[in-house]
Image (spheres, rainbow, N blue to C red):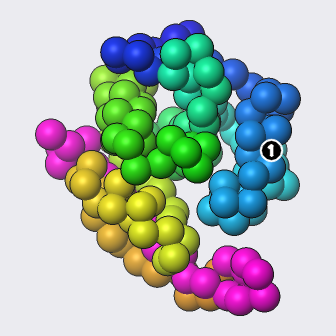
Amino acid sequence: MILKEGRLKLVSTTPDDPEVQQLAQDYQILKNLSETKIHPQPMPSRWCFRIEQDNKLIGEIRLQNIKWLNRKAEISLFLAGDEQGKGVGTTVLRILINFAFQNLNLFRLEAEVADYNEGGKQLFEKMGFVTEGRLRQAKYVNGQYHDIIRYGLLKPEYK
């Protein structure tokens, strides 16, 4: 499946896509990924998309841990460092939110962002996600523990 808007396209992929895995090895990306992304656990259901711009791989976005009974899923995404801060995150997140709410008929989306990831926090807040909690010292990076901010977005809240 391919979702497209302008020069950007999300190309359906698998969690072990070698090009995505190679891109994810960049430290700036790796430190922001969840532990389940680094050491995948069996997931009941997920949609994984390569993010390509002008046919170049620049990141990945996922709907994961989909709970069909509760109509909810978690979102995770990463972009290559030189693509951050250019509006790409906003576009691909909007595409995925629309896909989740309109095509999959999900009701709730969730995300986790490390407290030091200012760009990630701003992105989810800009897209209407609400801070729902804080997991204290839940992420260990470079010898330090960091909090994880939990975000949620309900279908009726999304504009």
49 left or right of 143 in image: left
- Above/below status of 17 relative to 41: above
By secondary structure, the bulk of the magenta-drawn segment is best described as: strand
Residue under the point 67% across and 60% down: 28
Given residues 41 and 121, the one toward you in this image is 121
Image quarter of residue 122: bottom left
Image quarter of residue 95: top left
- The spot of residue 118 in percent (x, y) is 42, 69
- The spot of residue 74 in percent (x, y) is 52, 49
Q: Is residue 141 magenta?
A: yes
Residue 151 appearing in the image: no
- Mark 1 lies on a secondary structure that is loop
Residue under the point 50% across and 41% down: 83
Q: Which residues are magenta?
A: 139-159
- Above/below status of 70 relative to 15: below
Quadrant location of the C terminus in the rendered image: top left
- The spot of residue 119 in percent (x, y) is 42, 61
Badge 1 density bin: few <14, some 14–19, many ≥20, Cα 10 Å:
few
Residue 120 appearing in the image: yes
- Above/below status of 137 relative to 13: below
- The spot of residue 101 in percent (x, y) is 33, 31
Image quarter of residue 129: bottom left
To which residue does mark 1 refer? Answer: 42
Farthest top residue in view: 1
Q: Is residue 109 magenta?
A: no
- Mark 1: which amino acid? Pro
